[in-house]
Amino acid sequence: MSARTLAIEVLARVAATDAYLNVVLDTALSEAPPTDARDAGLATELVYGTTRRQLTLDHAIAPFSTRKLETLEDKVLAALRIGAYQLFYLRTPVHAAVGDTVQALKDVGLTRASGFVNAILRKLSKLEAIPLPHPEDAVAHLSIRESHPAWLVRRWLAAYGREQTEAILVANNSPAPLTLRVNRSRIERAEMLTRFGDAGLQAHPTRHSSVGIVIPQPGRVQDLDGYDEGLWQVQDEAAQLVGLYAAFPREARIYDACAAPGGKACHLAERNEVVAADLHANKLRKIKAEALRLGVDARITLLAHDATQPLPASAGRFDAALVDAPCSGLGTLRRHPELRYRRQEEDIARLAALQERIFNRAAEAIPPGGLLVWSVCTTEPEEGIQQVKAFLKSHPGWSAEPPAPTAGLSFPSTESWLRTLPGPEGFDGFFAARLRRLY
């Protein structure tokens, strides 16, 4: 399967199923790997790049289409976007961007649409650049230029101003490097960095996390040194900081209320006993597999549980809780670019209501003197700081308590909170609060 054919298949499947793009792409590459590794790289670039730039590409394509784009078959629209992405962002020669994309459409069984796609791509190839709304209309201009929905751009402009909003948008359209968290129960970061260097990999320590490593061009993750030995786990630096910021005492028994996909549970289980709970049993199986690979499975107990409901007595007593709550995910758009088109503004209030229920239930499990860490991978205050302040207002027996200073560790924070935003530092967007139950 050619890179363009594979890209059409993946994008069409993502559009039809609302599945995560990375999962569909990884599955496709494993089931039908291109014979040339360069084709796998091109397919990945086409899939991610086209998704990141989808609104911009549609803005260019629409004037030349005789049909509304939303009425087109998924594979036809995918081919148009892939061709346009090559023309405007990869600057691929016209014969390849157009001809090879049209051939890929034929290869997926849509020869009847090849003339339609060919005609539009030929017209696009005559444009020097994609025409954009006037910069004075900041929302429309940035929305189309950086391919984010207008409602989200409007929110960020109001919250962060134009300069920081542009930095967030640009960061979301930049490929994320591979970031790992070393498994401290088996190895220290300095030794792992040495091993990567000996293997010929460019690797460097994360700036804020004391356990993170960044590898700009990793290749296939499962082929990296230390994977089979469970010496590290893939995890963004901001997510690593949540586990470090929690600073749970070594003897604490921890309730991880919304544990999937399991990165934070496995991080905590390097030192602590953890009950990793999630609503979906299939997600618990994935946590189990990772815990086994990392060798922390003896310290993780899996629990199928709805976090909005009281914990069963059989779960036992806890000293602390981590609530990495279900959220809009708007802090992770560089890793999951498809989310920006799926989220609606009303989702934020809906999710905040769900989060409040989970927050209150988790607090019930913590005795006086215990800790609760609230975490969300979003940029939106309704899910972060406003959620925590509302909790503290309605629960006078609780107080915000940042962790004690630790040598060699710094947290991007405001007041008592951990806060990261997408931008030049390379973070995902996260918010976390560390709360102590006083009585």
Image: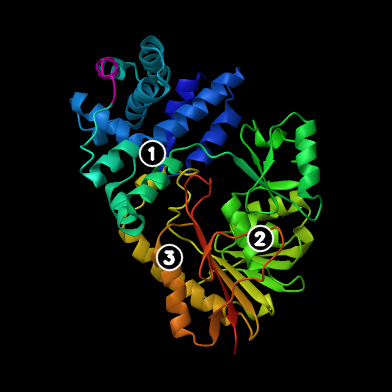
Classify mark 3: helix, strand or loop.
helix
Residue 162 can be seen in this image: yes
CB of mark 2 within 8 Å of CB of mark 3?
Answer: no
* 125 in the magenta segment: yes
Residue 399 located within the stretch drawn in magenta: no
Residue 237 in the image: state x and y as whole percent. 60, 51
Mark found first going from the N terminus, 2 or 3: 2
In the shown orientation, is residue 383 left or right of residue 69?
Answer: right
Q: Name the residue under label 3.
A: 383
Q: Position of residue 188 (x, y in %)?
A: 79, 50
Instruction: Say which label, 3 or 1, has the lower sequence index.
Output: 1
Residue type for callout 1: Ala
Name the outermost residue toward the top.
95
For the image, the number of numbered tags is 3
Give the labeled residue for mark 1: 15
Of badges 2 and 1, nearer the viewer stands 2
Residue at image x 73%, y 72%?
249
* Quarter of the image with the C terminus in it: bottom right
* Callout in the foreground (2, 3): 3
Frontmost of labels 3 and 1 is 3
Residue interval drawn in magenta: 120-129
From the viewer's side, name the closer residue of 419 and 22: 419
Q: Which residue lies furthest to the bottom in this view?
A: 439
Disc 2/disc 3 C-alpha distance (Å): 21 Å
Q: Residue at point 60% right, 87% down?
A: 438
- Residue in view at x 61 percent, y 58 percent: 241
Q: Which of 406 and 144 is in front in this view?
A: 406
Query: In which quadrant of the rendered view does residue 218 lie?
Result: top right
Q: Where is residue 134 in the image (x, y as percent from the top left)?
A: 20, 37
Q: Where 12 falls versus 348 (above or below)?
A: above
User: Which numbered circle lies on residue 265?
Assistant: 2
